[in-house]
Image (tube, helix red, strand yellow):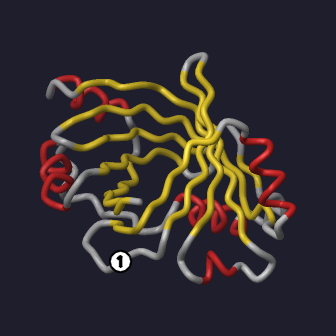
Amino acid sequence: MHIEIEAKIKVDSLKEIAEKLDSLGAEFRQEQLQRDTYFDDTNATLKKGDRCLRLRRRLAGESERFFLIYKGAKEKNQFKKRQEIEIEIKNGDSVEKLLLQIGYNKAIVFEKKRRTWQFGGCEVALDELPLLGTFVEIEGPDEQKIADVQRRLDMSDLPIVSESYASLMEEKLRESGREETEALL
């Protein structure tokens, strides 16, 4: 278990940010396609408690990995700060079946393209999501390092998005009158 601290920032384009990361000497890590499936019970107990249970399928090149992740309620902070427990699993299909058998339902499923860099002691993720657009996430060990990376990327004046991608996606699907709970690339 660890405490996740991150700044999520909505941006118009990722091209300039990728160029800025390159010019600052950031270390490119990888490009991924992530498929996130969020689970909750019929009473939406996790969502009502500002918590989530997510099964992530991550494709990076020929590598496919699966993670089961629990996130606790957000703490009061200038950035998004919450408890996170992440377990790598071997068989995503079996874990999905298990969760469904013990009473959880699929709440929402969506994909995102993510490119990650290491910079200033933080992980910087450039994300593209269907319906939502483009975002930058800066995750680090403390608020100061995150704020420093944000400043060095000339993003200090941009507002921090406190909502999760799942909440933003649910809202977007609801606004558009869509019945489905999937948004795939």
- Residue bearing mark 1: 75
Extreme top residue here?
Answer: 62
Relative depth, front residue between 182 and 43:
43
Q: Residue at x 24, y 44 (%)?
A: 122
Rendered location of residue 138, percent (x, y): 30, 49
Which image quadrant: the N terminus? bottom left
Number of numbered discs overlaid on the protein picture:
1
Asked which quadrant contains residue 3, the reply is bottom left
Q: Please indicate whether residue 157 sits to the left or right of residue 17 in the image.
A: left
Q: Please indicate whether residue 177 sits to the left or right of residue 148 in the image.
A: right
Which image quadrant: the C terminus? top right
Rendered location of residue 77, percent (x, y): 27, 75
Element class at badge 1: loop
Relative depth, front residue between 104 and 156:
104
Q: Please indicate whether residue 63 sits to the left or right of residue 140 in the image.
A: right
Rendered location of residue 99, percent (x, y): 78, 59
Q: Please indicate whether residue 72 sits to the left or right of residue 9 in the image.
A: right
51 lies above or below 113? below
Relative depth, front residue between 74 and 68:
68
Q: Residue at x 32, y 63 (%)?
A: 160
155 lies above or below 84? above
Q: Residue at x 87, y 62 (%)?
A: 101
Rendered location of residue 13, percent (x, y): 39, 39
Amino acid type, mark 1: Glu
Q: Residues within 10 Å of mark 1 (few under 14, many from 20)?
A: few
Asked which quadrant contains residue 35, the reply is top right
Q: Residue at x 81, y 78 (%)?
A: 42
Relative depth, front residue between 89 and 58:
89
